[in-house]
Amino acid sequence: MRVDSDLNKGPVYEKSFRFALRIVRLSQFLQAERKEYVLSKQVLRSGTAVGALVREAEHAESKADFVHKMSIALKEANETLYWLELLYQAQYIEKEAYLSIQKDNEEMLKLLISIVKSSKKTN
């Protein structure tokens, strides 16, 4: 599925956008099917913030600003992992769905960690 031309900018842009889409769909499912509103909004906020921060970092004012925005994206991805684990343990999502989205979340974390570490080295 082609979303827009910005996805040509690299894997972090594409993965963070596609991850946000999965989070939106998860939130919709939780609200419609499980009637869960509080945790679904938490995971929606943190999960979509990752992509928004990656996009924001694209036009950072400086290298330090770029690292800062990517670091916040990393924190949001880590927070999202917490909400996903909580949703799974509370039995709002099934194991298969959890493992699939958790894998995507872990990939985002690894990618963001790599970007933040390598960007700090070149500072």
Image (tube, rainbow, N blue to C red):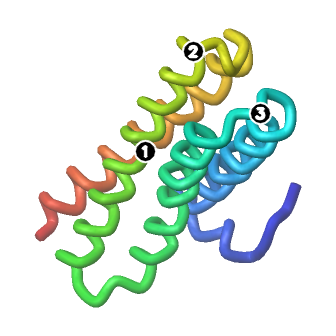
- x%, y% of residue 120? 15, 60
Pick out the residue farthest to the bottom: 61
Question: Number of labelled discs?
Answer: 3
Give the spatial CA distance, label 2 vs label 3.
13 Å
Question: Which residue is under mark 1?
Answer: 77
Q: Please state the horizontal and vertical placement of residue 32, each as a whole percent of the image.
A: 85, 39
Location of mark 2 (residue): 90
Nearer mark to the viewer, of 2 and 1: 2
In the image, 40 versus 58, the foreground residue is 40
Hey, what amino acid is under mark 2? Answer: Ala
Residue under the image location 57 percent in, 24 percent down? 87
Front: mark 2 or 3: 3
Secondary-structure class at tag 3: loop
Q: Secondary structure at mark 1?
A: helix
Residue corresponding to mark 3: 35
Q: Nearer the viewer, mark 1 or mark 3?
A: 3
The reply to whether dot 2 and dot 1 touch (C-beta < 8 Å) is no
| SS assignment at label 2 | loop
Which quadrant of the view contains residue 96? Answer: top right
